[in-house]
Image: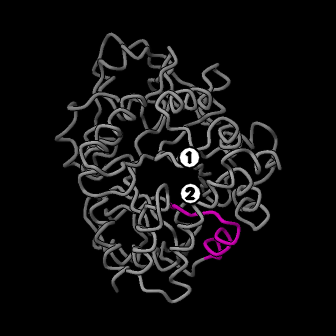
Amino acid sequence: MGTQESNERAGGTGRRALLGAAVLGAGGAVLGLSGTARAADAKHAGGGVKSLPVPTIIGHRGASGYRPEHTLGAYQLALDMGADIVEAGDLVPTKDGHLVCRHEPEIGGTTDVADHPEFADRRTTKVLDGVSTTGWFTEDFTLAELKTLRAIERIPANRPHNTLYNGRWEIPTFEEVLKWQDEQTRKRGKQVWIYPELKHPTYFRKLGLGLEERVAKVLRKYRKDRWNAPVIVQSFEPTSIQRLNKLVDNPLVVLLSGATTRPWDFVETGDPRTVADLIKPAGLREIASYAQGIGPTLDLVIPKDAAGNLTKPTTLVADAHKVGLVLHPWTLRNENPFLPADFRKGTDADAYGDVFGAYRAYFATGIDGVFTDQPDTGLLAREDFVNR
C-alpha cells in the first residue's frame, strides 16, 4: 500500500523527522532521562510538532468530559484547561458538501434533531460500514438546516452534569474551527493545535462526498496544508491517509481499533489483514511510508485480562518507535466504566475511579501522548509523571 513515491514526496521526510523528535522525547524514559528533561527537550526543540510537550495531552472532541462533545464550548474549555492539542473535528459532510464536526454522521444522539418535527421524515435506516444504523444523517441535511439544530450530551448516563449545556451550542463547521484556531492563537500569543479526523471516508466516497479532497481544499485555503502546520489529520482507514498523503503535507496518523478488527476500506477492497497485522513490524513499516504516527486503542498498548484488569504491555510502543512512528492512543476518561477494572472505585456509572493510576501505567510504556475527555486531569497526571 505504501510506495516509494509517497515516501519521497515533498515534505514527507520532513514530517517524519519532525514527529520523530517527539519519539525521542518519549524514549527518554528508556534512556534514563528525567521526565522534566524529556518535557523540556520537547518544548525547546523548535517549531512544529517538536514544540509540543511529551507526553502530549489531546482534548478528545474537546473537553467532552465537561461539555457536549464537538462544540465550540467543548473546544474552548479544552484550550482553557491547557490541552496541548484539541481534537476539533470528527469531520462529516453535509448534503451540500460542507464539512461539519460530529462524532458520527448519525446525529440523533448528539443533537436535538428528534425535537424538530420539520425533520421527522428524514429519519431513516442506513448501512454504515456494515452496521445497520437508524437515525438522522448529516448527508441528508444542508448546512443551513444543520445550523438550526443544537448539540446535546451523547452519554448522559455517565455525564448527567453535561446535560445542563444541552441546546447551548450549534454544530460547528471545519472552516469555523480553523478560524477559531487562528483567533485563539492570536489572543494567546501561542500556537493552538487541532487534530481533526476523517470519519467513514469509504462510505462517503461512495455517496460522491469524498472527504480527502474537501479537507485538503479547506486546509489549503487557510494555508494549513504544510509539514509544519498545526493540524494533525487522522483516520481509521489507511487508504484514506494514503490519499491525503498525496494531497497535503500535514502530519498524518492512522487510527487502530481492536486487534481482531479490519479497517472498513480493507473490507471493501478485499484486503484480508486485520489490525493485528498492521501492528506487526512489517505493517508498521508500511504505515511509516505514508504516515507519521498511529492512534491505537489503549488495549493495543496494554491488554486487559478476562476480568478487565491491565496485564503486561505489548511491544507496540517500541516497535512503532523503531520505524519512526509516534503513538497517540485513545481514550482515557475519568469515569469508572471507561477505566480498567483494577482502577475503578465503586460501581456508579458517573463516578470517578483512580484515573491517575491509569495514566501512570500508560505513560510508563513510553507513549507519546494520549487522547482524554478530561484534559485538566491529563495535565495533572503528566505533571506527576514527568516530575516523579
Query: In the image, which residues are magenta?
Result: 314-329
Q: How is the image coloured?
A: one colour
Q: Do the residues labelled 1 and 2 touch (CB within 8 Å)?
A: yes
Q: Can residue 306 be seen in this view?
A: no
In this picture, residue 168 sits left or right of residue 117 = left
Residue 354 magenta: no
The residue identified by callout 2 is: 295
Neighbour tally class for label 2: few under 14, some 14-19, many 20 plus, Cα within 10 Å:
many
Q: Given the current orientation, which residue lies at the most extreme bottom position?
A: 32
What kind of element bears circle 2?
A: strand
Residue under the image location 43 percent in, 28 percent down: 100
Between 245 and 343, the one lying in front of the other is: 245
The residue identified by callout 1 is: 234
Asked if 270 appears above or below 206 in the picture, the reply is below
Between 377 and 29, the one lying in front of the other is: 29
- Residue 50 pos. (x, y %): 49, 62
- Residue 225 pos. (x, y %): 55, 38
What kind of element bears circle 1?
A: strand
Asked if 205 appears above or below 65 in the picture, the reply is above
In this picture, residue 133 sits left or right of residue 55 = right
Residue under the image location 32 percent in, 20 percent down: 147
- Residue 36 pos. (x, y %): 37, 80
Amino acid identity at mark 1 = Gln
Q: Could you give the CA–CA distance between mark 1 and mark 2, rounded to whole angstroms?
A: 8 Å
